[in-house]
Amino acid sequence: MDKMRRVLSTAVNNLRKWPSNPRIIILFILLIIFLINYLKPIINFSNSTGYRVTPWVFPFFADSVFTQMIMMFGIVFLFCDAPFMDVTQPYSIIRSGRTRWGLGQVLYIMVSTAIYFSFLAVVSCIIISPNMFLSNEWGKVLGTLAQTNAGQVFNITLPINYEIQSIYTPVHAFFLSLILEWCAGTLLGLIIFIFNINFNRAIGAIVASVMVCLDMVIQNALPFYTYHFSILSLARLSILDTSGLSTRPTDIYAFSFFSVGIVLSGFIAVFSARKRSVKILPPV
């Protein structure tokens, strides 16, 4: 029990530093601006048609190549200071031990990623709340934008994918995309941690940024089967084949990929925390 408490303490102590960290504050302000920029045209369309919007917009943010890429660059920005070594961490390592300290950092990455994407999902609902109504269906606004060119008339740049609407219920799509984005973000965060602690702090962000851009490269230049190895692609609902009849990755494959990747990366992260020397670094 005491071991678990020390792991939790390490993660919680990192989270407590957020309100005083300008980088974190700037990140979340930029996320709000990003959401407003994409949702305001949808609100204008809702006002023009007289129909309210259902809250299920997050799956389309997660499915668009460009908006998902922006959100994942936010993850890179969030974890670019891994292994989070400030003046308090040496004392935390002494109290907890290297293994529990490493586990605490892994837990911090997992919890932070959950907070990050929950923030995006909740704030997107808050922004459209003046025009929102609850329904277990997609609603006329999202349905119209998915099936017509009305989005072009109102300069709506968020792609509303009809394939998602035809395959998934809104609640299913909302929570499935949230879980998949969490998996992808957690894996990216762990990769940043591993490269940063074993090399230097710039390497992890560079490697993760290349992985973030891979999805767009595949869409424009690489064979379709390459989606099987792209972290971001496996978190997009329109890429996953629920029937298993095409060459696209299935949802089972995506969850298997993320499960193995997170467990393996978590193990490597803790092992690296035990074996590598860590230095106090200036804040990013």
Image (cartoon, helix red, strand yellow):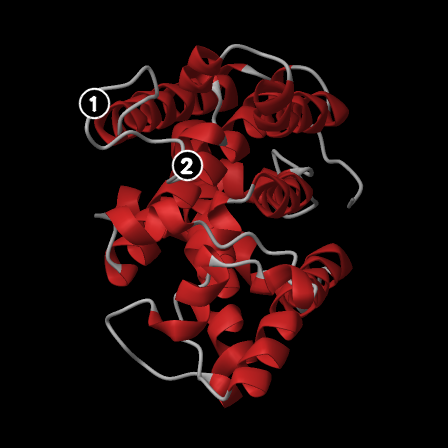
- Which quadrant of the structure image shows residue 213? top right
| Residue 12 visible within the image | no
Asked whether the residues under the numbered discs 2 and 1 touch, taking CB atoms below 8 Å apart as contact, a structural biologist would say no
Q: Position of residue 24 (x, y in %)?
A: 68, 58
| Mark 1 element type | loop
Q: Nearer the viewer, residue 13 or 227?
A: 227
Q: Which residue is mark 1?
A: 244
Q: Residue at horizontal 25%, vertical 46%?
A: 167
6 in relation to 262, above or below: below
**Which residue in the protein does label 2 denote?**
235
Q: Give, as a three-letter code, the residue at label 2.
A: Ala
At label 1, the amino acid type is Gly
Residue occupying the point 65% across, 74% down: 40
Could you tell me which secondary element the residue under label 2 belongs to? helix
Give me the residue at 61% from left, 48% from top.
67
In this view, 133 is above or below 258: below
Eye-nearest disc, 2 or 1 = 1
Horizontal placement of 254 versus 24: left or right?
Answer: left
